[in-house]
Image: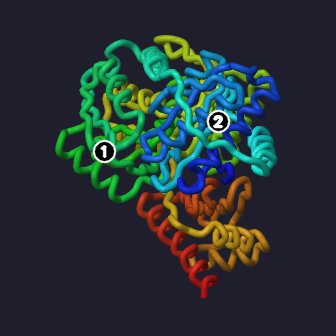
Amino acid sequence: MKFGTSGLRGLVTDLEGRASSLYTQAFGRHLLETGAAQPGDAVLVGRDFRPSSPGIAATCIGALRRAGLSPIDCGAVPTPALALYGTQMNAASLMITGSHIPADRNGIKFYRPDGEIDKQDEMRITAIAAELDRGQIDTTPGEAPDRSAEAEALFLARNAAMLPAGALAGLKVGVYQHSTVARDLMVRVLEGYGADAVPLGRSEDFIPVDTEAVSAETIELLKGWAREHGLDAIVSADGDGDRPLVSDETGEPLRGDLLGLIAAKFLKAQVVVTPVTSNSGIEAAGRFEVVRTKVGSPFVIAGMLAALETGKTGVMGFEANGGLLTASPFDTGSGTLSPLPTRDSFLPVLATLALAVREKKPLSQIAAGFRLPFAAADRLENFPVETSAALMAHLRQSDGNLAAFLAPISTVGAKSDIDGLRVTLEDRRIVHFRPSGNAPEMRCYVEAGTEDEAKSLLHEGLGLIRAWAAKVER
């Protein structure tokens, strides 16, 4: 088991039983050692709809109780709702979820009472787990009081304060429900603002929906529903409800970093923290300071905290997947949003739909109006971690290796090594190679002047990765 860009991830067969109990006990001891919790304090436990999540949650509940803490069961709930409830209760929490990755994998996200754990916490939890792993580990599952209704009610109240009453009246919005824990709450929130919400594609089987690299099959579904129902938009989220998906009136998904940019303008942000993978046009698109980080919410949170420490206000962040984080209170005109420094899918969805109503334009026109470089991203799944590490080492070894690798596409102009290798070509196109931080996947991000150029560059970039891997394997 290891920590990735957001939480502990691994195969279900590796996480069930001993590993989930081990890391939960290590988390509990870390809370007590640092004073983030006292013996007997409440710790919240939430989960997504993966078949393995209820069992892992029960194991974690048992481990928390044996650690001298008082677990509370929040049921199947969006991660931002769990984090918000923990903030209100001043309680630590953990979320059983693998986010967007397939159901044969799962994970645990850990939260201190003040928000997500950071990289230093991860290192200490890992060290404690290694120490505990030398002895016997009790994996007996446990039960806890159910507070899922309270967690949902608090999250609904937060979302009811974002827009004026009736702000989405007149919009017909599809809600792709699949197996996200946000599916019912999203319908309730939209209907609360007067939208005609149309539930679509509900599934009792877990469907891994990646909002950052939307699959061709998912796009085909969205386009079909948009035509069939005459929708103004379709919205959804990933498995644990912290990454948004918004398509325009044709079913074409909007990029997550565009949703983050729209939300930044909605909030009138002063400082925006976002990973290097977000669109390069963000700096010129708003009147705010932009801070670039590595990929992963812990790095975005660290960037936001650094801004707060220098006295900045109006601080928020977002990832290229659209998940939005707030470090400052924000006045929306309808209420004050308290800080929620963990990814949230609801705020960017509401900000985007509200903009469509305010400008009286279809979302396709609104997206085009931002004039961002065309961007695309995809991943090679089941790509061995060892192979991706070897590729990145080869490309970093010398400028000659990188130049030779990219020679079939273009000439290297400049490069950034903040997270993976982001290369600006001499013709100003961008190609970025980055191994996933929590799955055996190799990701490629590109930017170009037109949509067709971006798609072509993405195809070429992925092709270079495949060809190199095939050559190494021979």
Q: Where is 165 relative to 474, above or below? A: above
Is 393 left, or right, of 227 in this rendering?
right
How many numbered tags mark residues here?
2
Q: Amino acid at mark 2?
A: Ala
Q: Amino acid at mark 1?
A: Ser
**Mark 1 sits on what residue?**
203
Instruction: Say which element carries label 1.
Output: loop
Instruction: Say which element carries label 2.
Output: helix
**Mark 2 sits on what residue?**
63
Q: Residue at x 42, y 16 (%)?
A: 160
Front-most of residues 432 and 112: 112
Question: For the N terminus, which image quadrant?
Answer: bottom right
C-alpha separation, residue under disc 1 versus residue under disc 2: 31 Å
Front-most of residues 371 and 257: 257
Q: Earlier in the sequence, mark 1 or mark 2?
A: 2
Q: Residue at x 59, y 39 (%)?
A: 140
**x and y, in percent, of residue 468 in the image:** 60, 79
Question: For the C terminus, which image quadrant?
Answer: bottom right
Is 234 left, or right, of 345 in this rendering?
left
